[in-house]
Amino acid sequence: MMKRYLYICFVLLTALYINACKKEVKSTNICLHDSSIDYMKRWAILTTQTDVFETNGAVKSRTVIHPNGFFQINSDFTYNLFSDDAPVNGKWNINKTCDFVLNPNTAKERRFLVITLSDDSLTLRQTSGLTSVTQRYAAFKCPSLASLEFRWDNAFTLRAPYSTDTVFKAMRSKQPGYFKLNADASYNLILGAFNGVPAPPPATGTWGIAQPGCLLVLDKNKTDERSYEVQKLTADSLVIWRKDTVIKQNFLQHFFKHK
């Protein structure tokens, strides 16, 4: 009788141990409902990784790209995505299964698992069938004046016309010239001849960083004031984006730091 009692206790303890282990490895996904980390802010895009799997779970192919731009999660349950040649806006929420959902209850709904979250990093993953897309972000850092005070040589510009609900295919152009941001808050814009059109006269004015949004602003409070979203800034490159509501075109301008 004692042996049978000890056997039953052993089985129960084993079952409890196994069940406890299962609970520990049940899920590594993060539920933003319970997050104490401020994720409702601007995140700079680092990489987008696409994995295609075989039916047995083996990776069939993997591609990694490094888009420009940022993903802004707003506290009013809206979001802004500035990537490549046009912005995307919409709404977000967190559903009952802790998915982070963009454009909920619409034809454009997309659900993501939150894989990692810290004060300075965010990783989201979307899975559809045998394809998984993992998007990695870093906390966006507003550029300082000193980080922009250089001569930036034109690389190329993507110009995309838009209408009320459509952004058309971007047109790529490469005009010689440069954009110089000076330490005394002045700028110089020098452009060369382009497509048979003579070079425009050199332009100069004032520049600065405006809040909110870390916008690069030229000629503030003047009739020709222009604001740019700084999509990407590295040690040797700069990408800025501007919407021209008069001619209804988006401009994504790429520069290289002058050497």
Image (spheres, rainbow, N blue to C red):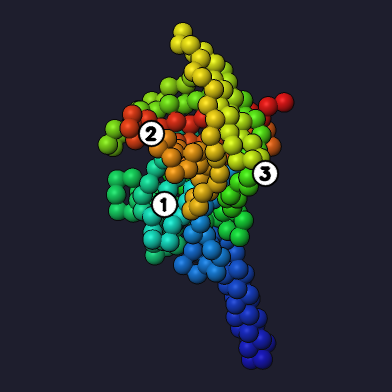
Identify the mark nearer the N-term, 2 or 1.
1
Residue type indicated by callout 3: Ala
Task: Identify the residue position indicated by label 1 in the image.
Answer: 79
- x 49%, y 59%: residue: 40
Asked if disc 2 and disc 1 are in contact, CB closer than 8 Å, the reply is: no
Element type at mark 1: strand
Percent coordinates x, y for residue 251 in the rendering: 44, 31
- Residues 257 and 48: in front is 257
x and y percentages locating residue 187 in the rendered image: 58, 33
Q: Earlier in the sequence, mark 1 or mark 3?
A: 1
Q: Nearer the viewer, residue 73 or 60?
A: 73
Name the residue rendered at 38%, 55% in the picture.
Answer: 78
Which of the two discs, 2 and 1, sits closer to the camera?
2
Q: Position of residue 174 (x, y in %)?
A: 52, 19
Q: Which mark is residue 244?
A: 2
Locate residue 33 relative to residue 25 in the image: left or right. Answer: left
**Image height of 48 relative to 204, above or below:** below
Position above or below: 75 against 146: below
Q: CA distance from mark 2 to mark 1?
A: 21 Å
| Position in image of residue 97 (x %, y %) | 42, 63
Amino acid type of disc 1?
A: Tyr
* 95 lies above or below 110: below
Whole-number angstrom distance, CA of label 1 to CA of label 3: 29 Å
Instruction: Give the farthest residue toward the bottom.
Output: 1
Image mark count: 3
Q: CA distance from mark 2 to mark 3?
A: 27 Å
Where's the N terminus, which quadrant?
bottom right
Instruction: Identify the amino acid type marked 2.
Output: Asp
